[in-house]
Amino acid sequence: MSLYEASVMSIQSLVLTRRFALRASATEPHKDELEMCLRSYGTNSTSYVLLEGAKRYFTSPRVNGFIAYQISAGVAVIGGDPVCAVADAPALLADFLAASDGRAVCAYLVMPEFLDAFRQAGFGDVQIGNEAVFNLDRFRRCQDHRTSPVCAWLWRAQRRIARRFC
């Protein structure tokens, strides 16, 4: 996560577990379909990195959306929230779990909006932490970045962002 993302958004990290195994989908969704879902339902920076790296994608004929996951050490690890309407998340999770046969499933980086859907599906949860949120505009008044550690950190973060994106 970039310094900018860490400074402008708060992610509540939750670890959710339930015992299941996932049967492989018959067809892997096309990347264009996944990107369309992200444009419609992506809610934070975590949503947009779901297409990066070696992940598998679960889709359901009942829900417009997907779940990104990986199998690691025999566990299906859901990365972030289901990418769908919040109201459709219980159905998508139910279909994901119905496609399983005993493998452990866990999820991480679940936002509060989706927590009830995971609980309805039988997951337990543990909050791991919160990320700090800084309003960068508020700290522009920091005149002397050499004397305030917070101002110095924000000053460096703004410079890195400006170099990268401007």
Image (tube, helix red, strand yellow):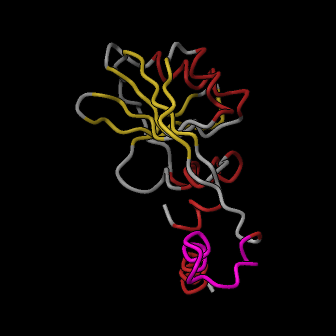
Query: Which residue is depicted at the point 59% across and 53% down?
Result: 132
Q: Image quadrant of residue 35?
A: bottom right
Part of the protein shown in magenta: 139-155
Q: In this view, does 3 lie above or below 34?
A: below
Classify the position of the C terminus by image quarter. Answer: bottom right
Q: In this view, does 105 lie to the left or right of 160?
A: left
Toward the viewer: 69 or 112?
A: 112
Q: In this view, does 97 lie above or below 148?
A: above
Q: Image quadrant of residue 65?
A: top right
Q: Is residue 39 left or right of residue 26?
A: right
- Answer whether residue 153 is magenta in the image: yes
Residue 140 in the image: state x and y as whole percent. 73, 78
Q: In this view, does 151 lie above or below 120?
A: below
Of all residues, the one furthest to the left in this rendering is 73
- Answer whether residue 78 is magenta in the image: no
Query: Which residue is depicted at the point 57% across and 22% down?
Result: 118
